[in-house]
Image (cartoon, helix red, strand yellow):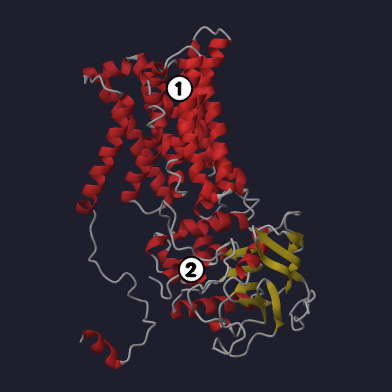
Amino acid sequence: MNELTLMLSDPFMQRALVAALLVGLSAPVVGTYLVQRKLSLLGDGIGHVALTGVALGWLVGSALGLASDDVLAIPGAIVAAVVGSLLIEVVRRRGRTSGDLALAIMFYGGIAGGVLLIGIAGGSSGNLMQYLFGSISTVSETDLVLTVVLSAVVLGVGLGLRAALFAVSHDEEFATASGLPVWVLNAAVAVVAALTVTVAMRVVGLLLVSALMIVPVAVAQQVTHAFGRTMLTASAVGVVVCVTGLSITYWNNVSPGAMIVVLAIAVYVVVSVARPLLTRRPATGDPHPDIPDDVEIGPGATKEACS
Amino acid sequence: MKPTAGAGSADAPDGTPVVQVSRLHVRAGASHILRGIDLTVRRGEVVALLGANGSGKSTLVKSVVGVTPPSEGTVQVLGSTLWADRVPWERVGYVPQRVGAGSGVPSTAQEVVASGLLHGRRLWLPRGWRDQVHDALAQVDLADRAHDPCHVLSGGQQQRVLIARALVRRPDLLILDEPVAGVDRPSQEAFAETMRHLVTDGLTVLVVLHELGELAPLVTRAVVLRHGKVVHDGAPPTARGDHDGVGHQHVHPHAAEPRPALPEPGLTEPVVGR
């Protein structure tokens, strides 16, 4: 118990816990839309592009001779992630076949651009490690304010517009025929995904951001069959794994980002294994007993088929 | 012999045009899908759009609901020109062709139907949306399945959910793309019964069909498309969905005919709901 109060009274840990809580809450909200649109890998694509943004921020920071080289890294990541996500959305809209390819090119370009630019800025790829794998223990007060603001935007859009975002994600053709601003709503999902990536970057790192958006949704899908409840359950799972994972690393010296993601996957495995044991399984039977038969079979036919 | 606006609708209950398509061309890449379509649907009419696969029925319907932009010509719905004016989409219900694969996250019938309450001027669900959704599901006889995920429903029931989604906004104009394709006979009869009530209440309907079937008594006019042109606009074929019907097409797999860029998956669906 004393250990717990010790952890909670540590200002570094306090900031880290708030950041983890917010990320755990908001990432699965966005993730639910991404899974629904079958864009589970979009977060990864944005994450890679954000790395170029980090390096670009670094380059601009050192060129301007700012006190700390990495002060512009997060703003750089935000700009790059938003631009990248909108670009992916434009490509997705233009032609369906090339969307997959464009996403792949963005993956590689993002990483290569990041490593290249950080070298030009006089850093090494080692400087990128904290962004690739997270560095939640170094969350400053400025970082925390940014995290709170961005999470508020993500939750505000993700929850506030959920009926319209659901409609667009569920059936784009019908949404268009309803006169919904489909392009604006699609762009909103893309931008919110980009903001989530940059918020979660501190907690789990760019390479694992997508896991935090997608894995809780995968867990939720095991136990619920409604869109709204999937989102709610996923958020709850996200908060639990983020806070628990971070707390574990307070006592054990392991990477918080990796711990959180491994924990989320462990929850997924446990739930998938336990689900058949926990849920009352109705006897398997005809799912549509009340539907009359369409096909008339002559009296001789069934016998013939059997012989 | 292009039918001019209003031709063939002498027995229209009301003169006001609800849908007015003039000289509509749609091209997609090398395909010239619609080649100068003129079509007018007046208030209170039930117009059946017939034709073979690839004749442009679905493309025409998609042009009317603002999904497919015209390459040439204009489309007017409820007096507003598409792609120029603000069309009152809240008065139009659209039932697209049912697509086989569901979305990544399962959603309930209630959630899907509720999305029909949104339109260009309303991005949030209105107060009392649950009651409205319940009423719409009751119209298609699925009120008891509101909380079931769509993917466990049969093909015919899924189709009815999509019809409820179009009805929930209480439209003046209902546009349906093959509403009974791959739907079992009882669902077709239930659908025809629902339509009968709505048409009596003054609903205007434009429906893409393969054969008139159960809807035959309701249809006031038939428009037949062939290779992107209107080849018949007038009285519906009298023979009820039998082989001598004007619009009848045998159900067969797609032959080697050139496929338009926009697919028409009507016949790729199973004949009986799963």
Asked which secondary structure carries label 1, the reply is: helix
Q: Of A88 and B274, which appears nearest the observer? A: A88
Callout 1: 10 Å neighbours few (<14), some, many (20+)? Answer: many
Look at 26% across and 70% down and name the residue there. Answer: A285
- Say which amino acid is labelled 1: Val
Left of A100 or right of it: where is B117? right
Question: Percent x, y for residue A45?
Answer: 46, 36
Asked which secondary structure carries label 2, the reply is: helix
Q: Identify the residue position indicated by label 2 in the image.
A: B159
Q: Which mark is residue A115?
A: 1
Q: Of A101 and B214, which appears nearest the observer? A: A101
Question: Percent x, y for residue A115?
Answer: 45, 22
Callout 2: 10 Å neighbours few (<14), some, many (20+)? Answer: many
Q: CA distance from mark 1 to mark 2?
A: 51 Å
Look at 43% across and 62% down and name the residue there. Answer: B146
Look at 24% across and 54% down and name the residue there. Answer: A279
Residue A159 appears in view? no
The correct choice, above or below, for A301 with respect to B91 in the image is below
Which residue in the rendered view is the most extreme toward the front? B256
Question: Percent x, y for residue B25?
Answer: 72, 64
Mark 2, chain letter?
B
